[in-house]
Amino acid sequence: MDCHPAVSSSLMETHIDHWEQLYREVGPSLLGYFRRQAALASSAEDLLQDTFLRAVKRNNRLDPPVSRRAYLFGIARHVGIDALRRQRPPGEPASEAAAPAEPEDERLEPMRLAIDALPAGQREALLLKLQQELSYEEIAAVLDIPVGTVRSRLHHAVRRLREQLNPQSEPS
């Protein structure tokens, strides 16, 4: 059973318009996500394209339970992980955070170093919250973990940052 050509063309245009709108809405945030990772910054535009290519191929999963934005960040996360694996030799550790050439405020560099020192799971959840302003539910969807785990990781990350950045304020 074939679709009428006019109907098929109309559906295709709607489909393309939908993806273009998503690209305009979420694309800049995803591009920033890649650019903030030193090892991925130089190929950020290509990784953005790969993210949307994977999303289009998986079109049937575009209406996730949380949000399309979280779904696309989840795909971007996997695209970035795959790119990092291709870039480094086996056994070499990954460096995920990019340090700016010159800090805007003298307090920012110690904060960046403290964030870089966090365990990977805590750091990733914290950066998704702070840089991408994702909700707990969206972070859970991106990382494919329960919301309670997101809450725990963020709680422990903030506590650890406070301890590292304000050691004198800790009770004896």
Image (cartoon, rainbow, N blue to C red):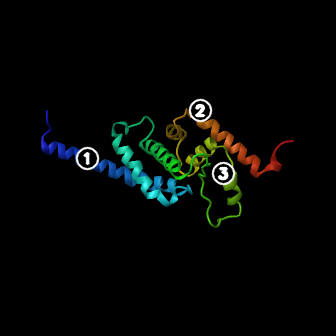
Which marked residue is nearer to the observer: mark 3 or mark 2? 3
At label 1, which amino acid type do we have?
Thr
Q: Amino acid at mark 2?
A: Gly
Q: Position of residue 74 (x, y in %)?
A: 47, 42
Q: Secondary structure at mark 3?
A: helix
Residue placed at 64% from the left, 67% from the top?
A: 102
**68 or 58, which lies in front?**
58
Label 2 crowd bin: few (<14), some (14–19), many (20+), radius 10 Å: few
Residue, x 59% and y 51% (percent of image)?
96
Residue at point 68%, 44% (across, down): 158
Q: CA distance from mark 3 to mark 2?
A: 23 Å
Could you say which quadrant of the image residue 66 lies in?
A: top left
Q: Answer left or right for 103 relative to 57.
A: right
Please tell me how crowded label 1 is: few (under 14), some (14-19), or many (20+) other residues with Cα within 10 Å: few
Q: Position of residue 46 (x, y in %)?
A: 42, 56
The residue that disc 1 covers is 14
- Which residue in the structure is indicated by mark 2? 148
Residue type beneath disc 3: Asp
Q: Position of residue 5 (x, y in %)?
A: 13, 44
N-term mark: 1 or 2:
1
If the image is split into quadrants, where does the N terminus sit? top left
Identify the residue position indicated by label 3 in the image.
Answer: 116
Instruction: Report, in whole angstroms, how far the alpha carbon at label 1 lies from the one at label 2.
Output: 37 Å
- Real-space Cα distance between discs 3 and 1? 43 Å
**Viewer-nearest of discs 3 and 1:** 3
Q: Left or right: where does residue 110 sit relative to residue 73? A: right
- Residue at the image point whose x is 48% and y is 44% from the top: 78
- In the image: residue 3, left or right of residue 133: left
Q: Where is residue 23 drawn, in percent x and y?
A: 38, 52
